[in-house]
């Protein structure tokens, strides 16, 4: 999960970061990214659609209010989830106008963050997460079964979609996919979505479309350990 927190109060920013870290570590062993911004303008300088799954904004900030920042975000990205944190209910109607998913009242506590994540449903976010490829083509990450590199082109094999081909290196592909936490590279030129694995036995992965991918001897232990941890975490998340 990729989260941005925007607040011009450095103490509040640190508090939110720590609370989010603690809650995420208790519900998921996967890697999560939390980026901090001290102003809305600072955030908007680098924001592009699809960068984040969830954005938390303080409402009462200097220069640009959280509502104004959210309006800018919504003009670019209609899918990202938004939440506001503030000490007043006065802006509740404005938060609904930008389709905010939650409204956190200060003082923020671990319990309020826990309730926030229960409402957000991490699994739903992950299933809907869209990646914009370097050529501008959007692709739903969970729909990728595996990728294969050949002759300077990577083919993305998809669930219920035709394969998509992109002129890109395998290194670039791994840099794009592996940080999301559910992709592995069991063989040179191959990247596999662990959600698509039906069976992992001996030195072979069997995928949901029937494809069989060999695991190289050098990566065998690493891949098996990662898949075992992934299955354990997935069971925990779904329970």
Image (cartoon, helix red, strand yellow):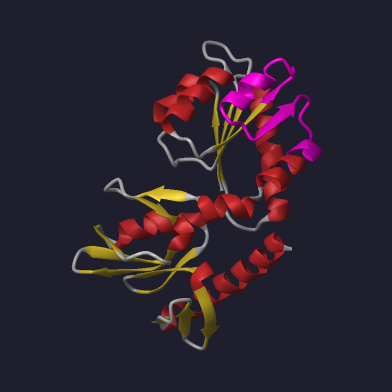
Q: Name the residue nearer the viewer: 15 or 163.
A: 163
Q: Return the x and y of residue 120 as percentages of the image width and height.
A: 66, 44
| Residue 210 in sight here | yes
Determine the residue positioned at 42% across, 37% down. 49
* Magenta stretch: includes residue 203: no
The answer to whether 115 is drawn above or below residue 12 in the figure is below
* View extreme (bottom): residue: 202
* 196 sits left or right of 29 in the view: left
Q: Return the x and y of residue 205 as percentages of the image width and height.
A: 47, 81
Determine the residue positioned at 71% across, 40% down. 116
The answer to whether 222 is drawn above or below residue 50 in the figure is below
* View extreme (left): residue: 151
Give the quarter of the image for residue 21.
top right
**Quadrant of the snapshot with the C terminus:** bottom right
Q: Return the x and y of residue 98 as percentages of the image width and height.
A: 56, 27
* 195 sits left or right of 132 in the view: right
| Residue 22 in sight here | no
Q: Name the residue nearer the viewer: 42 or 69.
A: 69
Q: Return the x and y of residue 36 as percentages of the image width and height.
A: 56, 32
Give the residues drawn in magenta, as a range: 85-113
Determine the residue positioned at 68% across, 33% down. 102
């Amino acid at each position: 999960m990729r989260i941005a927190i925007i607040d011009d109060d450095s103490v509040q920013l640190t508090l939110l970061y720590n609370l989010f870290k603690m809650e995420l570590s208790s519900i998921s062993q996967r890697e999560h990214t939390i980026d901090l911004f001290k102003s809305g303008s600072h955030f908007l300088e680098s924001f592009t659609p699809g960068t984040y799954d969830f954005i938390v904004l303080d409402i009462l900030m200097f220069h640009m209010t959280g509502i104004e920042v959210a309006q800018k975000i919504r003009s670019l990205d209609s899918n990202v989830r938004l939440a506001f944190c503030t000490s007043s209910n006065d802006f509740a109607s404005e938060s609904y106008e930008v389709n905010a998913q939650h409204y956190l009242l200060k003082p923020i506590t671990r319990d309020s963050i826990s309730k926030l994540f229960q409402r957000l449903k991490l699994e739903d976010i992950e299933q809907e997460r869209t990646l914009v490829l370097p050529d501008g083509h959007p692709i739903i990450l969970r729909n990728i079964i595996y990728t294969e590199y050949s002759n300077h082109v990577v083919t993305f094999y998809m669930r219920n979609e035709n394969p998509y081909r992109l002129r890109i290196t395998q290194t670039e592909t791994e840099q794009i996919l592996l940080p999301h936490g559910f992709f592995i590279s069991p063989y040179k030129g191959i990247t596999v979505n662990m959600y698509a694995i039906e069976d992992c036995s001996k030195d072979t992965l069997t995928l949901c479309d029937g494809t069989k991918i060999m695991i190289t001897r050098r990566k065998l232990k690493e891949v098996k350990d990662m898949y075992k941890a992934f299955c354990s975490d997935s069971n925990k998340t779904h329970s």
